[in-house]
């Protein structure tokens, strides 16, 4: 079978605290039962998924399955934009989520069951989604990265930095993200920022948390962007001003049920270009990767990649390609 018809499977063995490796025999069995012919390769280091994506496309593969989390998907998407063989939307991209957060999959109707993801892959239920681009400052140079879910700045990046530090120390408790988030709340110092959307300044004040993205979920199930539409050519923005811990605690359910904009400390916006300035600088993270600092510039590439979506998403939206 030509590589163009075969699926190239990129497996992150450490995703989900090792579930990528432990559960792959089960995933492989589902793929085999669905008669999905594939070539699995395991990542060996950070950014290896990006390298494997570039190589796979160069070798003629036009179907890629990611067995990993949002971070692995993030690396693969950037590989699609680095390669020079075809347009990114000429490659069909699918995800079998084994990570901790799996926020991208929540937006697209995946339940978390491997069998459901494989069924969608077999049916090739595809959808053209937007892709965000973030430009940031790092080591006095401007750099850019692509993202398909949500980028976070301020408190969000602060938490990710602490989580990364704990992981390097080998602390892998299932409660570490919750504990780290609560502890970080009391250690984070709000920063003054300016936010411009499509050239208009919409905010000038102190920041707790900032989310900008294509999809609805981040942080393992938080709906910080509940009104986001994945193919409208726009970026959604949700900004949380400094708030007392108890005020936020009693409204925490709004972060999970889509009611975040009922919290009066939240500012929302939507646009094609967003610029963030701050003093002192704040960091930005994308799907668990700390990238750099302000000034940050965000833009969107409409309907830039073709992804496999869940049956529920297809039924609710009635959109597919």
Image (cartoon, rainbow, N blue to C red):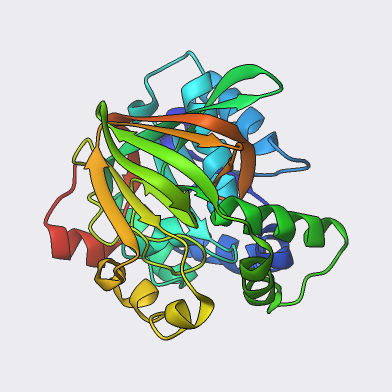
Q: Is residue 223 above or below residue 206?
A: below
Report which quarter residue 261 is drawn in.
bottom left
**Residue lying furthest left in this view?**
318
Q: Is residue 301 above or below residue 212?
A: above
Residue visible at 56% across and 36% down?
279
Can residue 302 be seen in this snapshot?
yes
Say which of 149 and 249 sits in front: 249
Give how far across and how far down residue 226 sits, in percent: 28, 62
Q: Is residue 298 above or below residue 202?
A: above
Give how far across and how far down residue 179 sits, in percent: 68, 76
**Residue lying furthest bottom in this view?**
250
Say which of 125 and 128 sits in front: 128
Q: Quadrant of the C terminus?
A: top left
Residue visible at 79% across and 60% down?
167
Horizontal side, residue 25 vs residue 306: left or right: right
Give how far across and how far down residue 149 sits, in percent: 42, 48
Can residue 36 be seen in this snapshot?
no
Say which of 11 and 47 sits in front: 47
Give how far across and how far down residue 245 sits, in percent: 52, 77
Horizontal side, residue 59 vs residue 17: left or right: left
Report which quarter residue 306 is drawn in.
top left
Say which of 279 and 7 sits in front: 279
């Amino acid at each position: 079978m030509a590589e163009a018809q075969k699926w190239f499977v990129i497996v992150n063995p450490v995703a989900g605290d090792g579930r990528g490796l432990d559960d792959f025999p089960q995933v492989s069995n589902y793929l085999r039962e669905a008669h999905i012919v594939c070539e699995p390769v395991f990542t060996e280091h950070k950014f290896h998924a990006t390298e494997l994506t570039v190589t796979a496309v160069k070798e003629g593969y036009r179907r890629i399955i990611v067995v990993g989390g949002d971070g692995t998907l993030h690396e693969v998407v950037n590989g699609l934009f680095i390669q020079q063989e075809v347009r990114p939307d000429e490659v069909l991209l699918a995800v079998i989520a084994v990570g901790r957060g799996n926020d991208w999959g929540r937006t697209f109707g995946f339940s978390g069951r491997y069998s459901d993801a494989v069924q969608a892959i077999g049916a090739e239920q595809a959808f053209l989604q937007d892709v965000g681009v973030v430009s940031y400052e790092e080591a006095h140079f401007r750099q850019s990265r692509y993202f398909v879910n949500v980028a976070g700045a301020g408190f969000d990046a602060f938490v990710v930095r602490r989580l990364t530090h704990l992981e390097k120390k080998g602390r892998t408790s299932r409660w570490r993200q919750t504990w780290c988030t609560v502890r970080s709340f009391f250690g984070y110092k709000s920063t003054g920022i300016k936010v411009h959307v499509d050239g208009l300044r919409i905010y000038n004040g102190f920041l707790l948390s900032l989310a900008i993205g294509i999809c609805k979920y981040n942080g393992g199930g938080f709906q910080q962007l509940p009104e986001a539409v994945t193919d409208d050519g726009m970026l959604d923005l949700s900004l949380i001003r400094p708030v007392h811990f108890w005020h936020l605690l009693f409204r925490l359910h709004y972060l999970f049920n889509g009611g975040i904009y009922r919290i009066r400390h939240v500012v929302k916006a939507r646009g094609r270009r967003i610029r963030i300035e701050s003093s002192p600088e704040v960091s930005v993270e994308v799907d668990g990767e700390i990238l750099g600092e302000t000034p940050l510039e965000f833009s969107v590439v409409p309907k830039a990649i073709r992804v496999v979506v869940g049956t529920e998403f297809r039924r609710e939206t009635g959109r597919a390609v």
